[in-house]
Image: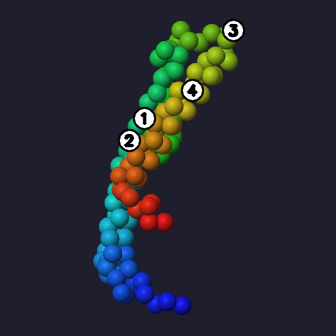
Amino acid sequence: MARGGSFRSGGFGGMNQAAMMKQAQKMQRDLMQMQEDLEQQTYSASAGGGVVTATVSGKREVTELVIDPEAVDADDVEMLQDMVMAAVNEALRKAEEASAQSMSRLTGGLGNLF
């Protein structure tokens, strides 16, 4: 088996093991800070022209649900349920998208190495 390309002989662009560990530790600290920041954020979305608004946290928990009283129709509960689900799902999608964007900024092109 060929021995060229080992870590000691300059693998990973000549980065030595200590530098790799330091970079990994920094990335881990940055990731933890990013997760804390995301958990503090809130994401809102509306449905039904604004008659239902849902707010979720970065922890993906519903923190607020506002329903315009005019949207409450005992004869059409199903439509209200659909609007609530749509608003909650859109707010959750926004939270997930923000998380993915933050992760992408943190890792940069790292995914291309694997």
**In terms of image quadrants, where is residue 29?**
bottom left
Q: Any mark on residue 43, and which?
A: 1
Percent across and percent down for residue 90 are 51, 31
Q: Any mark on residue 53, and which?
A: none
Query: Quick one: label 2, few (<14), some, or many (20+) residues within 10 Å?
Result: few
Callout 3 touching callout 1 (CB < 8 Å)? no
Question: Mark 4 or mark 1, which has the lower sequence index?
Answer: 1
Callout 4 touching callout 1 (CB < 8 Å)? no
Q: How far apart are marks 4 and 1 (CA)?
A: 14 Å
Query: Quick one: label 1, few (<14), some, or many (20+) residues within 10 Å?
Result: many
The residue at the point 49 percent across, 89 percent down is 2
Q: Nearer the viewer, mark 4 or mark 3?
A: 4
Q: Nearer the viewer, mark 4 or mark 2?
A: 4
At label 1, the amino acid type is Tyr
Q: 93 or 17: which is nearer to us?
A: 17
Left or right placement of residue 75 versus residue 103 in this view = right
Query: Quick one: label 4, few (<14), some, or many (20+) residues within 10 Å?
Result: some
The residue at the point 47 percent across, 46 percent down is 59
Q: Name the residue under label 2.
A: 41
Q: Name the residue under label 4.
A: 86
